[in-house]
Image (cartoon, helix red, strand yellow):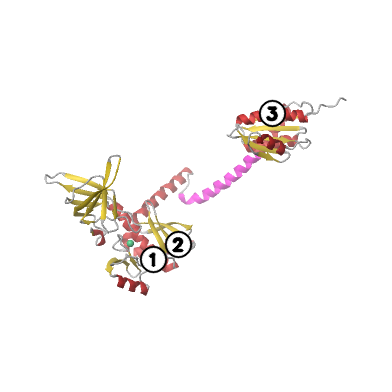
Amino acid sequence: MTDRLYYDDAFLKSFSAQVVDIREASRADGVSIWQIALDRSAFYPASGGQPHDTGLLTATSRNGATLEVPIESVEEDDQGEVWHFTRKPLLAGTAVQGAIDWPRRLDHIQQHSGQHLLSAVFARELDAQTVSFHLGETASTIDLATSLIAHHSLERVERIANEIIAEDRAVTVRTVDRRAAEALLAEGRLRKLPERDGSIRLIEIADYDLNACGGTHVRSTGQIGGLLIRSVERISRGTRVEFVCGLRSVALARRDFVLLHGAAATLSISPADIPAAIERLRAEGKSSAKACQKLREDLATYHAIRLAVEEMIQDNLRLVRRVFTHHDREYVRILASRLTATVPRTIALFISAETDPARIFLARSQDMKLHCGEVLREALAAYGLRGGGSSDLAQGDLTKEQAEELSVRLATDLRTQLARPRPAE
Ligand SMILES: [Zn+2]
């Protein structure tokens, strides 16, 4: 069984070991992935919500040539053997130097230890128990068995966690047998106990928290280096809290700072003035939209008058058929409505072809006997399409070609139906 060096020293960055076993894990497109077992290893295998380490194994041959074997992933099997995944095989018996990717490990140590602390503060301050933990690529989350937490409670939890970090309390590791662990659980000193048999590894934050865990941790809370709660969201089984610790929180704060400064620079203001500027822009946007709508309606009124003047009255009927390619549907609808409201004995057959599908409008003035909704519904049904509306204005969507064809046909039909030759005087 692999001697797990990180159990005793989570800060061990390099070590010497010997390959004890190798097997092919998979092969795809002629490339093999190998699994290497070592007699001892500082590499952490993925478990308990903490991701695996990566790093390098280096073998030196008798003539002094070195072979570097990158370790891409590390897993433990059910028997407790730790397997190092690589694309380069090493013979059993080969002596190697191992080096873990230290920045990655330190990051995991900070997030994972920060999770112990954050869970402990939530349990103590809000009686909110952690049900799961996830260490992600950019941020970590804990799921709490509690309904949504008030903003001021979150700030208090964050402040207490950071005070404990500043106090630099010792974080110690010890191993006890199961009976001793059960006694601690019964006393209420231990929050949870894993199901498995054998000895239990306990992590203690001095005078604050005791937890059973097989992960890698800081030596004292100061090494967590700060904790920042990022967001809180309601999930089906409680509340998810996203947080970052240590160097990650600095990196994220830096990213936020760059974003804020970029946003402020585009407005030529200072970052502190962003909320007020957004409020002002929103108000301006709203009033511009209102002014724009007013202008559109005024324009539609004049446009309607121009159309009425342009179109000849034939047999006591003004039938205006138009295709608009540069006006949106809403404008064309207003225009149809204005035209038929303004002048008598008028039918509007308009198509807004600015978008695909196009939209056809049929509208009539109040003095016409015609149910636009029924006429258009029936006409569209012939294309297997739906549409309709009120007796004085109806609409439906169809392709531009269909719309033009339909409008020509409807114009002919309506003229036949509605034209009323002026009686001889
Ligand atoms: Zn842990």
Residue 174 location (% of width, % of height): 27, 67
Q: Pick whichever of labels 2 and 3 is earlier in the sequence.
A: 2
Residue type, mark 3 in image: Arg
In this view, the residue in front, 363 or 89, is 89
Residue receiving disc 3 = 409
Mark drawn on residue 120 = 1
Q: Residues within 10 Å of mark 2 (few under 14, many from 20)?
A: some
- Residue 325 visible in the current orientation: no
The mark tally for this picture is: 3
Q: Residues within 10 Å of mark 1 (few under 14, many from 20)?
A: many
Q: Is residue 282 above or below residue 359?
A: below
- Report the span colored magenta: 271-294
If the image is split into quadrants, where does the C terminus sit?
top right
In terms of secondary structure, where does tag 3 sit? Answer: helix
Q: Quadrant of residue 170?
A: bottom left
Q: Nearer the viewer, mark 1 or mark 2?
A: 1
Which corner quadrant of the figure contains ligand 1? bottom left
In this view, the residue in front, 32 or 113, is 32
Residue type, mark 2 in image: Leu
Q: Quadrant of residue 294?
A: top right
Q: Pick whichever of labels 1 and 3 is earlier in the sequence.
A: 1
In terms of secondary structure, where does tag 2 sit? Answer: helix
